Structure formats: structure tokens, C-alpha cells
Image: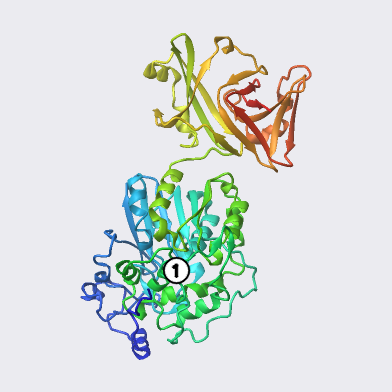
């Protein structure tokens, strides 16, 4: 259904409210008077020390919103409040949720409870001019780099680190720029229908909106989108594109259209019909047009992108920590295309080998359509640390007698952490032996993984903490006593069903025996030589005491190399405890 224009006001009133001044124009909260108690109160125009005029949506506008019980918090940046909600365990891992245009953090109402219940500290921020953040009146007070700068300062003010990021729409254009320039701040990144555009300097993507402060009766560009959305795609093929030649019209409509309101956009770009009370909640921050400068100008910020994102994209192109894409399968805009999603997957190292998805029954605002499902996927993804090429890990082997057999339980840091040195170095094998009742304890690490992707039998759903090092049960191995003193370069058998993939273009390290058997290094060890590093591997052969007729080689793959173990794997170690699997 088409929403009514809840906040149309006359052009004369708009001009008056935007230009009025008062002796009390400053950023002190007291100047709001009683307006916080009345959503329809006349807007109180305030001014920052730098001369920026702004308004603040009355608190009364946010009362009794459906599924939104959250109290706002604020960070003041340059005299303007940046609003956010902060839910869940304050000591838990941080999840930062960034919305796009013209939504606000209400978009995450279905995700916040699931993520909070998963043990995370969940922060959903409102961009300047949106939600409960302050709202400058002049569209010239909004800029792409300004949004970027405020997000950086917001993160620094809250002292957020090891951030698990989720971004969508303009939240991705802003958030991915911050991540690309500050990759050390982020632990994992998930993108839903978004990207970081890199546009050459000197290019103007779209004509600028003329007379942007006019209020004009323009046709609603989304009027042909039904409340229950139809399917636009056959797989990745767009069967019908309702947005052809659309973006310039969208820039003009959002900037000048008298009927522009966020709820009509949210209704059009969600798969399911948006209930009236939820539509009203999306409009709540904007009781009259004077509050709308931020959402109005956002599409036009596309013309500020040329030449500014080269360094940020370079940072993302070297981001090796986990980077996942969760796409809506029915977003007809460019951000919803398979090509946009695939570009991120192909360009960002951390995206390789992860379970990227396109979600059915979801459109551009996928958080509204499939919020619970997305949040559940994020809880699993943010709770794991996928073991990837170059990652550090450690294992503790507990050797026990099991009837007539000797069994080793392998407890590893895989998918939990990168085996912090201070935690690993503090462990004592004898203490672990006493605490666990093991006959022997083998400290296997630190080690560094050389495989790009792994699939096959997963770990057991059992966890154990040694000191403060979290581990999970990876395997239970029956040990042949004759293997206890197995010499380097002699074969052993490990019971497992796995598929290891080394990607094309990667350098691999192989041992070739005197009879032509080839073994590929899957993990480098520092248990014998604590100074060994990955950069030493190309020339490691000169440091090994190879058996007669054996050779060590380094080579770059021209195509993917797949090692499959169907029930058992044949492995060897060199004298430095580096592990190799037979091809």
C-alpha cells in the first residue's frame, strides 16, 4: 500500500523554520524546553559553536515504537549528538551495525535481540541527520567524508576494537571505507547488499540536483513497487528492472519531492508488506520536513565519491580476516546484483572459501525481511575464527589409555582464537596432565596453517579451557605405540575425512621421496625452531637433513590443488615438526 504523506508542510513554513533564529540558539539540551514531550512541537533550531544550525527530534516521537524498547545513548562530535543503542553483554565481543538511507537503527530491531542473546555487545548507530542523531538543516553540512570522519571518531570515542561489522547500503559505503583505512580495528566483516565504490577522480557519476531546496510535487519513484514484492530475478539474471534510468530520478525525488518519506522507500524495497505501525516507526525521526535534510541529501553524495576511495579499497584488497557477503536475492538495484557481490568475493582475500549466500524472500532492506535468520548466521560466524592460510593455531594432545588402546584427544584453538602467545606460553604440560588425568600431554604449537580452505568432518561440540586458552575437541586418535618414536620422514596414518584446497597463485612447499611420493606441507611448526617464520619456507630445504634421494621444492600453483582424505590421511613430519600430507 502507498503511505500517506505524514509530514508535508508548506514551502513557506519550511523556509521560515529553516531560517528562524533565537537568542537561545546553542547546543545545550535545556534549549529544547518542552519539545521533547511533544512530537508535534515547533522545532527548536539550535546552533553549534561552529555555526551549524540543527534540530533534534523530540523524544516523544520515539515512544512506543513496535519492537523497539531500547534507550538511546549519545556521543557528541563537533557539537552534534551521534545516537546509538548499546545492548547485550558490555564485556562481550562487539558487533557494530550500520544502516543506510533512508532508514535508521530501527532497521536492526529483529537482529539486536538475537545477537544480544548470543553473548555480543551490540551497537547500532544512527548516521548524522537520521534516527535520533542531531539533524543539521543545511544539506551542505552533510558530506561523504564527513560521515566517514564521524564514524571513525565514534569508534574511537567508544574505544571499540576487534569489531564484528555488519553494513548495508550507505552503511557499507561509509563502514567499508573506515575498515579499509583502519583494518586493525576489525575482527570480521559482513556485507549485505553494499560495496565500496572506487570511482576515478574527475568523473561526475550523475548530474547534480538543481535548486535542491525547492519542494516540488514530483512523482514517487517507488509508486510501482507492490507491497508484496514480485520476483525480479531468475538466479542472477534480472528479468525485469524497475530501476532502469532510476538513480538521477531518485536523487531529485529524495531531495525535492514533497511526498518523500522513508516509509514508502522501506515498503517498496522489502519483500514483505510493511505493517503500518512499523512504517510509522521508520518515519518517527522526521515529524516534519525540517528534520529530513540528512535522508534527502544522501543519494547526492554519490557525486562526492570520485577519487577518494583508492586507499580504502587497497586496504580492503589486503584484508585477510573473515569477510562474508549475505545478499538479498531480490534487490533490483546495482547493490543487489550478483556482480557486485562477486566483486567483493573475488577482490578481498578474507572472503575466499566462506559460505556466501543470497537469501530468498529478501529485498534491498534484507534486515527487515530476514533479520532473525541473518542474526542467527552472524552469531555463528562472529563466534568462529576460520582457520585460514597463514593463521597461527595451537593444539594440546591428551594421551590416555582406553581399554587396550592408547588414544589421544586433540584439543585445538581452531575457529576460536589465534592462540595468543601470552596464553600459550603460560601453559604447563605437567599441570594439564594432573588436571586432566592424562598419561601424557603433548604441546603441539605454535603452528601456522598453509591450507586455503578446509571442508569435511567438523569438530566435536566440546570445549575446554587450558589456563585462559579456549580450545575445542578436534579429533580422537588411536595411537599405535610403535609410532611413539617415529622418525622424521616416515609415514603415519591419521583417521580423518577432509578436503584441503590450496588456491591457484599460492606458493606451496613439497617433499618428494626417493621413490617419487609427493607430500605437501599443510602446517608449519615453531615447536622445534621458535624462530622459523613463513618467509623462511621458500628456502627451507637448505636447513633440512633430508634422506638420500629426497628433495624439497617451493612452487607457485597454476591451478587449485586439492588433497582429499577419505577416512584416513598419510602424513609425515620433517625434523622441525612441519607436517605434510601425501598427495
Find residue 53 and report its image quarter: bottom left
The residue sitting at the bottom extreme is 12
| SS for callout 1 | loop
* Residue 81 visible: yes
Local packing at callout 1 (Cα closer than 10 Å; few below 14, some 14-19, many 20+) is: many
Would residue 61 be found to the left or right of residue 501 on screen? left
Q: Does the rendering let one see residue 315?
A: no
Q: Position of residue 225 (x, y in %)?
A: 46, 72
Q: Position of residue 95 (x, y in %)?
A: 41, 51
Residue 521 appears at what percent x and percent y? 65, 29
456 vs 261: above or below: above
Residue at horizontal 40%, vertical 73%? 264
Q: Nearer the viewer, residue 107 or 545?
A: 107
Q: Residue 520: horizontal and vertical position, in percent?
A: 68, 29
Tell me if 167 is positioned left or right of 273 in this view: right
Vertical arrangement, residue 143 with respect to residue 447, above or below: below
Residue at numbered disc 1: 101
Give the quadrant of the N terminus.
Answer: bottom left
- Above or below, comparing residue 525 to residue 222 in the picture: above
Residue 7: which quarter of the image? Answer: bottom left
Amino acid at each position: 500500500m502507498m503511505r500517506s504523506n505524514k509530514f508535508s508542510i508548506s514551502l513557506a513554513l519550511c523556509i521560515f523554520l529553516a531560517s528562524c533564529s533565537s537568542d537561545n540558539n546553542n547546543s545545550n539540551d535545556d534549549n529544547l524546553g518542552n519539545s521533547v514531550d511533544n512530537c508535534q512541537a515547533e522545532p527548536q533550531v539550535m546552533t553549534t559553536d561552529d555555526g551549524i544550525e540543527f534540530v533534534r527530534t523530540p523524544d516523544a516521537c520515539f515512544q512506543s515504537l513496535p519492537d523497539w524498547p531500547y534507550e538511546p545513548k549519545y556521543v557528541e562530535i563537533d557539537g552534534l549528538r551521534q545516537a546509538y543503542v548499546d545492548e547485550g553483554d558490555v564485556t562481550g565481543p562487539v558487533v557494530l551495525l550500520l544502516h543506510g538511507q533512508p532508514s535508521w537503527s530501527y532497521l536492526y530491531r529483529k537482529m539486536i535481540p538475537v545477537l544480544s542473546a548470543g553473548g555480543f555487545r551490540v551497537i547500532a548507530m544512527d548516521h548524522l541527520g537520521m534516527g535520533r542523531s542531531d539533524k543539521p538543516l543545511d544539506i551542505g553540512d552533510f558530506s561523504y567524508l564527513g560521515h566517514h570522519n564521524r564514524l571513525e571518531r565514534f569508534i574511537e570515542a567508544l574505544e571499540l576494537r576487534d569489531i564484528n561489522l555488519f553494513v548495508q547500503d550507505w552503511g557499507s559505503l561509509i563502514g567499508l571505507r573506515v575498515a579499509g583505512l583502519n583494518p586493525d580495528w576489525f575482527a570480521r566483516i559482513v556485507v549485505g547488499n553494499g560495496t565500496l565504490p572506487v570511482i576515478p577522480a574527475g568523473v561526475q557519476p550523475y548530474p547534480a540536483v538543481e535548486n535542491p531546496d525547492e519542494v516540488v510535487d514530483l512523482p514517487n519513484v517507488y509508486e510501482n513497487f507492490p507491497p508484496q514484492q514480485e520476483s525480479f530475478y531468475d538466479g542472477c539474471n534480472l528479468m525485469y528492472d524497475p530501476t532502469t534510468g532510476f538513480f538521477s530520478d531518485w536523487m531529485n525525488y529524495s531531495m525535492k519531492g514533497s511526498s518523500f518519506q522513508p516509509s514508502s522507500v522501506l515498503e517498496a524495497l522489502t519483500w514483505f508488506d510493511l505493517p503500518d505501525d512499523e512504517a510509522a516507526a521508520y518515519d518517527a525521526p522526521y515529524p516534519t520536513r525540517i528534520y529530513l535534510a540528512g535522508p534527502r541529501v544522501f543519494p547526492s553524495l554519490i557525486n562526492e565519491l570520485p577519487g577518494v576511495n583508492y586507499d580504502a579499497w587497497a586496504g580492503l584488497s589486503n584484508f585477510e580476516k573473515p569477510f562474508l557477503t549475505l545478499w538479498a536475492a531480490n534487490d533490483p538495484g546495482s547493490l543487489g546484483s550478483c556482480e557486485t557481490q562477486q566483486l567483493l568475493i573475488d577482490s578481498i582475500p578474507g572472503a575466499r572459501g566462506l559460505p556466501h549466500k543470497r537469501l530468498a524472500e529478501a529485498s534491498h532492506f534484507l534486515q527487515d525481511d530476514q533479520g532473525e535468520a541473518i542474526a542467527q548466521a552472524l552469531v555463528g560466524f562472529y563466534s568462529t575464527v576460520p582457520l585460514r592460510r597463514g593463521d597461527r593455531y595451537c593444539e594440546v594432545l591428551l594421551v590416555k589409555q582406553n581399554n587396550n588402546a592408547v588414544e589421544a584427544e586433540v584439543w585445538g584453538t581452531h575457529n576460536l582464537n589465534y592462540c595468543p602467545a601470552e596464553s600459550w606460553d603460560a601453559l604447563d604440560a605437567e599441570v594439564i596432565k594432573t588436571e586432566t588425568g592424562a598419561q601424557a600431554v603433548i604441546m603441539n604449537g605454535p603452528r601456522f596453517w598453509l591450507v586455503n580452505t578446509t571442508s569435511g568432518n567438523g569438530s566435536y561440540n566440546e570445549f575446554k579451557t587450558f589456563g585462559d586458552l579456549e580450545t575445542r575437541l578436534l579429533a580422537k586418535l588411536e595411537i599405535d605405540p610403535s609410532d611413539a618414536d617415529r622418525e622424521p620422514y616416515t609415514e603415519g596414518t591419521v583417521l580423518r575425512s577432509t578436503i584441503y584446497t590450496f588456491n591457484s597463485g599460492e606458493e606451496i612447499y613439497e617433499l618428494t621421496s626417493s621413490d617419487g611420493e609427493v607430500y605437501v606441507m599443510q602446517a608449519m611448526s615453531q615447536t622445534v625452531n621458535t624462530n622459523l617464520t613463513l618467509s623462511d619456507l621458500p628456502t627451507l630445504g637448505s636447513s633440512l637433513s633430508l634422506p638420500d634421494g629426497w628433495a624439497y621444492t617451493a612452487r607457485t600453483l597454476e591451478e587449485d590443488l586439492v588433497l582429499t582424505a577419505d577416512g584416513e590421511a598419510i602424513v609425515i613430519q620433517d625434523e622441525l615438526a612441519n607436517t605434510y600430507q601425501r598427495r
